[in-house]
Image: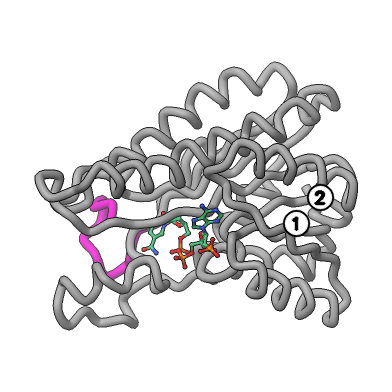
Amino acid sequence: MSLKDKVVVITGASKGIGRAIALRFAPEGARLALVARSASQIAELAEEIQSAGGTAVALPTDITSEEQVQALAERTEAELGPVDVLVNNAGIFLLRSLAETTLEEWEAVLNTNLRGAFLCCRAFLPSMMRRKTGRIINVSSSAARQGYAEQGAYCVSKHGLNGLSKVLALEAKPYGIRVNVVSPGGVLTDLSAGLRRSRGNVNESEWMTAEEVAEAVYYVATQEGAATTDELKLRRFASDPWRTD
Ligand SMILES: NC(=O)c1ccc[n+]([C@@H]2O[C@H](COP(=O)([O-])OP(=O)(O)OC[C@H]3O[C@@H](n4cnc5c(N)ncnc54)[C@H](OP(=O)(O)O)[C@@H]3O)[C@@H](O)[C@H]2O)c1
């Protein structure tokens, strides 16, 4: 599937993997809705894409808010037209043992990584279902399959996101809507900075780049025909084969 003229919503587009996805998709002719809370960062990215000849609008949104996500769906459709691809990428991380995790921290992680993705799916699905076409890509993690000490809330949120993706894939299939999960291990972004510090002197050249993950997201976004990818798992080449991180 070509992304030419496809309307694509990318959450968490202000930096890291989401920004890299936007910069990967824009030259393909996708018409992008850039979503994050940091209005200035997505506005600058939209300008950068526009000055390179692409199409992008910045739509500042907190994806944990039901009202804001509903408004996002309405504004996206008004400014760009019906959405073809939703990339649920926004996420936060917490490096804390379960015993030390406060309820506020737990809720922040679950509300962003799981509730936010649910709200976005629910807001954009009806139009995809009416048009019997669409694609939803959830950026999950190796933490969706494996437990990591001091990543309890994060692991739970990503296990939940994979559960959501499995059910959504079943419910969306009759409408011709494809649901894909892309699950990377360690990626060199702000999100993993605290984790990398806690592991001491990690060799950053052995960590995946946001651009490498964006390439995987591009692959599932454009895959068509009889084959599909339920979950595309990416691990660092430096890790042991068949490990997930
Ligand atoms: N980095 C890794 O090692 C790694 C590994 C596996 C999976 N992942 C997953 O990849 C995704 C992207 O992570 P990243 O590494 O690119 O992190 P990042 O650089 O910290 O970027 C996170 C993005 O999410 C946005 N965001 C956070 N809370 C939000 C909210 N409530 N509403 C709207 N946007 C929100 C942030 O923008 P604002 O702060 O401006 O809102 C930012 O654009 C996440 O789902 C993460 O779990 C990352």
Tell which residue pokes out farthest to the left in this image: 99
At numbered mark 2, what does the secondary structure look like: helix, strand or loop?
Answer: strand
The image's mark for residue 7 is 2
- Tell me, yes or no, whether the highlighted magenta stretch contains residue 241: yes
Q: Work out whether residue 34 or residue 5 is closer to the camera in this orientation and state it.
A: 34
Q: Position of residue 86 (x, y in %)?
A: 67, 44
Secondary structure at badge 1 equals strand
Q: Which residue is mark 1?
A: 33
Q: Residue at x 27, y 44 (%)?
A: 153
Closer to us: 123 or 244? 123
Location of residue 57 in the rendering, given as x and y in whole percent from the top left corner: 80, 63
Look at the picture and state if 148 lies above or below 168. below
Q: Is residue 242 left or right of residue 111?
A: left
Is residue 28 shown left or right of residue 169?
Answer: right
Residue at image location 56% in from the left, 39% down from the top: 180
Asked if residue 103 is among those painted magenta in the image, a careful observer would answer: no
Q: Amino acid at mark 2?
A: Val
- Mark 1 and mark 2 in contact? Answer it, CB < 8 Å: yes
